[in-house]
Image (tube, rainbow, N blue to C red):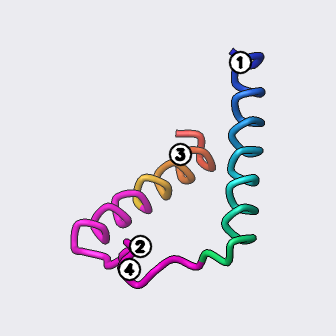
Amino acid sequence: MVPLLVPLFISAFRRANDLAMAMEARCYHGGDHRTQMKPLRYKREDWIAYAILAAYFALAVIFRVFGI
């Protein structure tokens, strides 16, 4: 798998670099009507997921320290 993935990633990065250089050479800055990334807004479900993740991490640490 590695002999296939390494050249694939190298060619993808080389292509991205060539494209970025071409866009920069043509003074491309994007327009007002281009799609922009929307700002991240946390919802209640996100905070619940963070709490569950923190509790799971705390339990993992406790089990590791006390050998339970």
User: Could you tell me how far apart the alpha carbons at marks 3 and 4 are, in whole angstroms?
Assistant: 38 Å
Residue matched to label 3: 63
Q: Nearer the viewer, mark 2 or mark 3?
A: 2
Residue at disc 1, secondary structure: helix
Residue 24, horizontal then vertical, whole percent: 71, 71
Q: Nearer the viewer, mark 1 or mark 3?
A: 1
Residue type at mark 2 is Met
Q: Are marks 4 and 2 in contact (CB under 8 Å)?
A: yes
Q: Are marks 1 and 3 in contact (CB under 8 Å)?
A: no
Residue type at mark 1 is Leu
The correct choice, above or below, for 32 with respect to 17 in the image is below
Q: Residue at x 67, y 78 (%)?
A: 27
Residue 21, horizontal then vertical, whole percent: 76, 62
Residue matched to label 4: 39
Q: Residue at x 51, y 77 (%)?
A: 30
Residue 20, quarter of picture: bottom right
Residue matched to label 1: 4
Residue type at mark 4 is Pro
User: Could you tell me how far apart the alpha carbons at marks 4 and 1 are, in whole angstroms?
Assistant: 37 Å
What range is drawn magenta here? 29-54
Q: Earlier in the sequence, mark 1 or mark 2?
A: 1
Q: Nearer the viewer, mark 4 or mark 2?
A: 2
Q: Nearer the viewer, mark 3 or mark 4?
A: 4
Residue 17, quarter of picture: bottom right
User: Could you tell me how far apart the alpha carbons at marks 2 and 3 are, in whole angstroms?
Assistant: 41 Å
